[in-house]
Amino acid sequence: MHTNRNQISENGNKNNTPSLNWDDARIFLAIAREGTLSRAAKRLNWGIATTSRPLERLESTLQVRLFTRDQQGYTLTDEGRDLV
């Protein structure tokens, strides 16, 4: 079977669909468990900005908001609970 190279992205997915980065999923779980970005960053031994970027990338890849953010911290959305 002949496949056009333009139909498969470099990560092997057809139609250039982004793939899940498992490191981003690990950060997502840390934030879900800890409830705040700062506690998740502390648990991971990372800075807050370093911790927030993978979450933003994961939400962008999945095209869904995983947390609501407020002064109390991060609360899983229905989609976030489904992902957990």
Image (tube, rainbow, N blue to C red):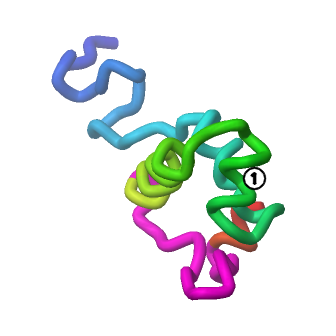
In the image as oriented, which residue stretches furthest toward the top?
2
Query: What is the x, y in percent for residue 56?
Result: 44, 56
- The count of marks equals 1
Image position of 62 (left or right of 41) = left
- The correct choice, above or below, for 83 with respect to 45 in the image is below
Which residue corresponds to mark 1? 30
* Residue 18 vs residue 27, the one in the foreground: 27
- The correct choice, above or below, for 10 with respect to 68 in the image is above
Query: What is the x, y in percent for residue 75?
Result: 68, 80
* Residue 47 vs residue 31, the one in the foreground: 47
In the image as oriented, which residue stretches furthest toward the right?
33
Which corner quadrant of the image does residue 81 belong to? bottom right
Element type at marker 1?
Answer: helix
Image position of 22 (left or right of 69) = right
Residue type, label 1: Ala
Q: Which residue is at a point 62% across and 39% down the rendered structure image? A: 46
* Residue 45 vs residue 61, the one in the foreground: 45
Q: Which residue is at a point 28% across and 37% down the rendered structure image? A: 16
- The correct choice, above or below, for 57 with respect to 7 in the image is below
- The correct choice, above or below, for 38 with respect to 70 in the image is above
Query: What is the x, y in percent for residue 42?
Result: 73, 48
18 inside magenta stretch: no
- Look at the image and tell me in which quarter the C terminus lies: bottom right
- Give the residues drawn in magenta, as a range: 61-79
Query: What is the x, y in percent for residue 70?
Result: 56, 86
Image position of 5 (left or right of 48) = left
